[in-house]
Image: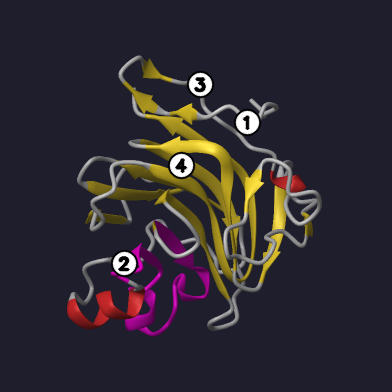
Amino acid sequence: MKISRWSLVFFLAGPLGAAEPIAPDLTTLGRTNAGWELPRFPSLGQSANSDRPNSITAGATTGAYVAGVELAEGTIEFEARGRAADGSSFVGVMFHGVDGTTYDGVYFRSFNFGHDNPVKRDHAVQYIAMPEWPWHRLRRERPEEFENPVTPTPKPDEWFRARVVVEEGRVRVFVNDATEPSLEVERLSTRGRGKVGLWVTGFGDIANLKITPKS
């Protein structure tokens, strides 16, 4: 389902039950940016990606919220492809967002997928709660608690599917057809709902974003 009336606010987990899944048009990013909010972020989406429908290739430090959409609890699904070069690709999503500096996030360091160094391999998927809990504070004060290896392990430069399950007190992250999460953490922010969107640092491809409320 493509969003056509961006002025309408979707409350995804309200007392009246679940809404329809939302599948925003990624191809407008970096072009018209119709249907997206870009608070304090450069424009996300350098070009459409021909490998997947409804996809973009993103670069630099970028992020975008789906306009008019808020998420309390539910599932965020997307396809992603990073880069194999070390430190080149951080691709994921934001949720419970307020603006360009306050949000929860989950992202992948695809260059660490299956890395020969076991320490780097353990730093493949990361949860953050900005601005209080960036990755470096979590790694320093609560090491190995909010980042994990990815299982099953994709190749660093191949497409994979991600499913981020946002619940009242925790976040779980599944990759491809896994029945067990690659990452399961307590949610550190106290916000009960907020904006949802894409988050990229470096370079990466993202396709087929879908936001589904909790039933």
Q: Residue 96: image x %, image y %?
A: 38, 48
Mark 1 — residue?
7
Q: Which mark is in front, 4 or 1?
A: 1
Mark 4 — residue?
76
Of the two numbered discs 4 and 3 on the same chain, state the one appearing first in sequence: 3
Identified at 50% across, 62% down, the residue is 100
Identified at 67% across, 60% down, the residue is 44
Vertical placement of 209 versus 110: above or below? above
Q: Which mark is in front, 1 or 2?
A: 1
Of the two numbered discs 4 and 1 on the same chain, state the one appearing first in sequence: 1
Of the two numbered discs 1 and 2 on the same chain, state the one appearing first in sequence: 1
Label 1 residue SS: loop
Vertical placement of 153 versus 32: above or below? below
111 falls in the magenta region: yes
Amino acid, disc 2: Asn
Vertical placement of 15 versus 123: above or below? above
Q: Residue 98: image x %, image y %?
A: 43, 52
Q: Are marks 4 and 1 in contact (CB under 8 Å)?
A: no
Q: Are marks 4 and 3 in contact (CB under 8 Å)?
A: no
Mark 3 — residue?
20
Give the extent of the magenta segment: 104-133
Decide: few, some or many residues near mark 1? Use Cα within 10 Å; few <14, some 14-19, many ≥20.
Answer: few
